[in-house]
Amino acid sequence: MKLVAITGSIGCGKTTIAKIVKGLGYTVFDVDGWVRRIYFNKSFLNVLEDKFPGTVRNGVADKRALRNIVFSDRSKLRVLEGMIHPFLKDYLKKVIRRNGRCDDLFFIDVALLFEMGWDKYCDLILVADVDYEIQKQRVMDRDKVSAEDFDKINNVQMKNEDKKVLADVVVNTDKSRNLLKAELINIIKGLETAYDQRNCI
């Protein structure tokens, strides 16, 4: 199994890259999808309501209310991450065990790759990047949040400049989808070659 991480800060185009890669026929594991599943777990919701009163209503998590809490208080963000990250790590290990004998290229779409220490499980790392002002506007338009809310979210994440330093490949997503797709096709060919060369060393 050759595991390639697709990561990047909020609004940098990570998900767009993942969708294009999936459209090219590759398997892409969506960690955001894994997170969404846990919010349907009744036991998790009970703990969530206990740790963050008022964030569960009629058996459904109020994610906006939860976001306002954790992005305003880093200590509470760490509490939430402490609840979610172990679940995600177990799921990742199951995926690796299930596909470990395959000699295929797999991708994982994960925003907090470095924050969770998952880079050690990946053979190669691709970081999505874009100019800060474009990143900011994308998030404000997509999530209907204010500039202040964007800053709160962005400030608790690892800076994209730091992620780029740790990347094998950096992809600027400020281009048309067709150009981005063509670039990714070439990059993937290079990733496969790079992996093969590592195995020969």
Image (tube, helix red, strand yellow):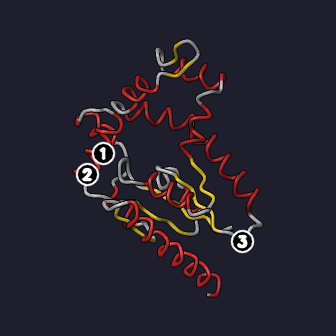
Q: Earlier in the sequence, mark 3 or mark 2?
A: 3
Q: Earlier in the sequence, mark 3 or mark 1?
A: 3
The residue type indicated by label 2 comes to Ile
In whole angstroms, how far apart are the C-alphas of marks 2 and 1? 6 Å
Q: Nearer the viewer, mark 3 or mark 1?
A: 1
Question: How many residues crowd around disc 1 within 10 Å: few (fewer than 14), some, or many (20 or more)?
Answer: some
**Label 2 secondary element:** helix
Where is mark 2, residue-wise? 134
Residue 76 falls left or right of residue 132: right
**Label 3 secondary element:** loop
In whole angstroms, how far apart are the C-alphas of marks 3 and 2? 38 Å
- State which quadrant residue 165 falls in: bottom left
Task: Identify the residue at image location x=74%, y=67%.
Answer: 102
Where is mark 1, residue-wise? 138
Question: How many residues crowd around disc 2 within 10 Å: few (fewer than 14), some, or many (20 or more)?
Answer: few
> How many tags in the picture?
3
Callout 3 touching callout 1 (CB < 8 Å):
no
What mark, if any, has residue 102 been given in the picture?
Answer: none
Task: Identify the residue at image location x=44%, y=53%.
Answer: 16
Callout 2 touching callout 1 (CB < 8 Å):
yes
The residue type indicated by label 1 comes to Arg
For the N terminus, give its image quadrant.
Answer: bottom right
The residue type indicated by label 3 comes to Asp
Pick the front one: 170 or 184: 184
Where is mark 3, residue-wise? 103
Task: Identify the residue at image location x=38%, y=67%.
Answer: 179
**Label 1 secondary element:** helix
